[in-house]
Image (tube, grey):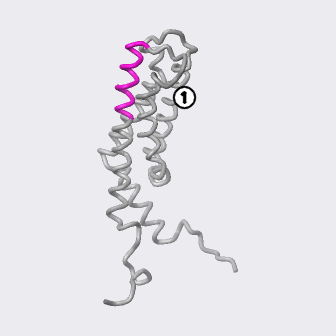
Amino acid sequence: MTHGADIGTHPDIMQMRARYEAAAANPAAQLADGLTLLSGLYLALSPWIVGFSGTRTPLTVNNLITGLAVALLAMGYSSAFGRTYGISWVAPLLGIWTIIAPWVIRGGMATTSTIISNVVVGALILLFGLATMRFGMMERGRSGGFHTTGPAHMGPAH
């Protein structure tokens, strides 16, 4: 049995997309996404801004890769929140990783300036990532778990 209807046109899917588009259009969500993007870019460039000792240390490579990942996530959140909200938990984890990386990565040759830089930008990424998660949860909570109350979804009369 084949169905000719595209699931993307299902009323529940369309309603869910509309809710996430509204969440992404929220000025506070846009601010959080923009600040997450800037934090990721700073993290990627921090070895050259802060002046890490040596440009080929493991901490330099870590910050470059982690910063680019955060920036890409932020761009995804701001441009396609409805499709990326499910991975909004990744940014806070990357923030925590950024905070602890100077002590975990061997051969990182962490200095006071690199530690302070990582802790501050990691805390910012953590906070902005939690804000992004909050906006997704708020929209999910408002929708009651994305179920509509139309006749097709109503249970027996009480």
Query: Mostly what secondary structure, the magenta segment?
Result: helix
Q: Quadrant of the N terminus?
A: bottom right
Which secondary structure lies at badge 1? helix
Q: How many marks?
A: 1
Tell me: 130 left or right of 104.
left
Query: Can you say whether 49 is above or below 144 in the image?
Result: above
Tell me: 90 left or right of 2.
left
Q: Which percent across, then down, holds residue 138?
A: 32, 56
Can you tell which quarter of the image residue 33 is in? top left
Q: Which residues are magenta?
A: 111-125
Instruction: Name the residue at 33% across, 62% down.
Output: 141
Closest to the observer, 77 or 116? 116
User: Callout 1 environment at 10 Å: few (<14), some (14 to 19), or many (20+)?
Assistant: some
Query: Can you say whether 153 is above or below 16 in the image?
Result: below
Can you tell which quarter of the image residue 57 is in? top right
Does the magenta portion include 123? yes
Query: Can you say whether 138 is above or below 77 in the image?
Result: below
Instruction: Name the residue at 34% across, 45% down.
Output: 29
Query: Can you say whether 148 is above or below 40 in the image?
Result: below
Which amino acid, mark 1? Ile
Q: Which residue is mark 1?
A: 65
Does the magenta portion include 44? no
Tell me: 20 left or right of 4.
left
